[in-house]
Image (spheres, rainbow, N blue to C red):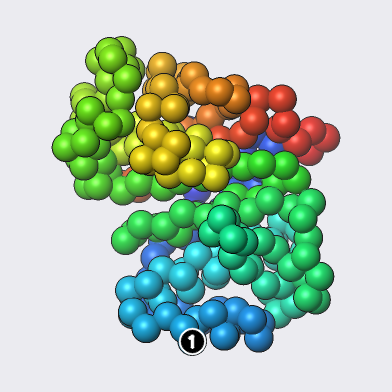
Amino acid sequence: MPLEPCVVQEILGAWVLAEPREPGEVEVPLGEAERALLAEMPWPLRRAEWLAGRRVAKRLLQRALNLDPLRTQVLPLESGAPRISFDGVPRPELVLNLSHTKGWAVAAVATSRVGIDVCDDVDGERIARIARRVFSEGEAEACGAFRSRETQAAVWAMKEAGLKLFIGGVFDPGARAIRVESLSPPRVVANPMMQVALLRLPDAAVAVSRDEVASDSGR
């Protein structure tokens, strides 16, 4: 399924936005706490990534939920997951997740847990180098992970998006915690059970994960 760049789309009951990365540090309306956090980042690449993530997040929140970017802040929880506040007041009923690569910045927001990950096709090749740490026995062959760079990127994105529901990473609790059964249709096995949508950007794969029983309704 294609994901149209710069257009808010509804995926599994979550709002999703993807934007191409621009060189350097992009302009983003920041609150006082965000500016203080940025000032503590000495590395240009990290600053650029952080700003790209905040820009796509604030644009998504404005377009999907009418939250003014000047009054909205996106700050990290202790886990590192992003937290939304509006006029200085936390909005715990809104769950935001971000991901970025050299080429893209993506964001998803929902009223219950959501995970999102983007993987450039060129980066998908790395999954072969750590296959023993990533795949369960027979998993890669069953889902066709190594057919192409695109399928490798898709598998990586699906695993990472799923792990974000655990507030974990590819090594903790471990990529094997998410078993990719199929790319078409996208399907994973995990505990807790989850839904995964697989989408395509130019030269990149995007996956969105939701708890199987928690997807928002009524949209």
**In the image, farthest residue toward the left:** 129
Q: Position of residue 174 (x, y in %)?
A: 39, 35
Q: Position of residue 140 (x, y in %)?
A: 27, 20
Which quarter of the rendered picture does the C terminus lie within?
A: top right
Q: Quadrant of residue 44?
A: bottom left
Residue at horizontal 63 percent and vertical 68 percent from the top: 74
Q: Amino acid at mark 1?
A: Ala
Q: Is residue 94 left or right of residue 108?
A: right
Say how many tags the image has.
1
Q: Position of residue 187 (x, y in %)?
A: 48, 20
Name the residue nearer the viewer: 193 or 107.
193
Residue at horizontal 62 percent and vertical 61 percent from the top: 77
Q: Which residue is mark 1?
A: 39
Q: Quadrant of residue 71?
A: bottom right
Residue at horizontal 55 percent and vertical 39 percent from the top: 166
Whether residue 199 can be seen here = no
Q: Quadrant of residue 45?
A: bottom left
Q: Is residue 136 above or below residue 48?
A: above
